[in-house]
Amino acid sequence: METTSAPEEIPVVDLSNLNEDLVARAVVKASEEWGIFHVVNHGIPQELIIRLKEVGTEFFQLPEEEKKALAKPKDFRNTEGYIANLNGWADHLYHMIWPPSRVNYRFWPNNIQDYKEVNEEYAKEIKKLSEKIMGWLSEGLGLGREALKEGLGGETVEYLMKVIFYRPCQDQDVKYGTPPHTDLSGITCLIANQVYGLQAFKDNNWFDVKYDDSRIVVIIGDQVHRMSNGKYKRGEHRATLDKEKTRISWPVFVDPNLDHVVRPLPELISCDDNAPKFKPYIFRDYKFHIWNRLPLD
Ligand SMILES: O=C(O)CCC(=O)C(=O)O
Ligand SMILES: [Fe+2]
């Protein structure tokens, strides 16, 4: 049976603790048990987070024609661009924020003051934070700090910003803004406005992901789960809609590039008692399998 309340809480890891071993252990434990956790005192200036949310919110307040100028082209190879009314209740804006060689400003709002500067600054900060987290997770596997980052493609790793604008919804038949899923990413770092809606699944319960401006939500995605040969859980999550309030969220997906092959890290599977649980996949094929609901392993 599923319920939405349970005594446990999604772990919160304070990154400012001077004992880095303790921080690393908490991140590892949260990733083993939950696949989703909060970080606080993460080093990203609160002012920057607030500005990022302001400029993203401004985009969704633009007249529809101005938003449509960024519409995702139908035949475009990537996911970038604006998609209106995806499931009736949510509009999405996707654009790559890192590496600079993959950034296409055509999909960034250009008529919102500071949009570019703020997103560029956030990209650098999120890269630092996610590399730090992947570093601790690598050590938790008994490997060097760079292992998961390298497995994901090193400096070719791509950071995809998604801004989701969920309209309020009173229709009882509409259950989710985003249905239950795991992310295809390595990891995902998410912030949101003050309206709750994100929920995480663990031990047959859905937990509300509480949110405020001091927190960043970290979700372990499919690729870190696969590279760790299943040691780290991928966080299953979903987003509900609020009856009265608009909810906006800003996940950044830390993804391999489409041509990169992700596999359980070879150093982990060298010993007989840890045979690979997952097949290697070119990320492009992995996405194809998921989107077409094809069996994976
Ligand atoms: O809106 C949210 O909080 C979650 C969105 C999400 O899970 C996704 O876009 O993958
Ligand atoms: Fe997600």
Image (cartoon, rainbow, N blue to C red):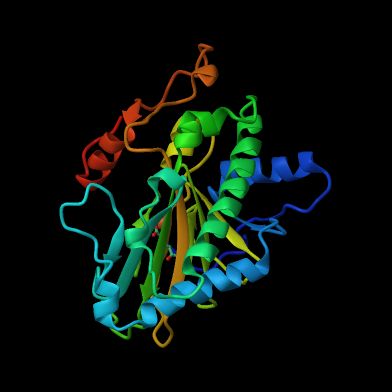
Q: Nearer the viewer, residue 45 or 134?
A: 45
Tally of marks: 0
Q: Residue drawn 45% across and 77% down?
A: 57
Question: Relative to residue 31, is residue 179 depicted above or below?
Answer: below
As drawn, 30 above or below 12? above
Q: Nearer the viewer, residue 171 or 192?
A: 192
Indicate the position of residue 197 as horizontal and vertical percent values.
46, 71
Q: Residue at x 43, y 85 (%)?
A: 245
Query: Residue 188: where, in percent of width, then height?
Result: 49, 51
Which residue is located at x 62 percent, y 61 percent? Answer: 9
**Quadrant of the drawing holding the N terminus:** bottom left
Residue lying furthest right in this view? 18
Q: In the image, what residue occupies the spot 19% across and 45% down?
A: 292
Task: Quadrant for the C terminus, please.
Answer: top left
Residue 186 in view, yes or no: yes
Is 141 positioned to the left or the right of 188 in the image? right
Q: Position of residue 34 (x, y in %)?
A: 55, 49
201 shown above or below 127: below
Residue 229 makes an appearance in the image: no
Rendered-image quarter of ligand 1: bottom left
Q: Position of residue 25 (x, y in %)?
A: 71, 40
* Quarter occupied by residue 222: top left
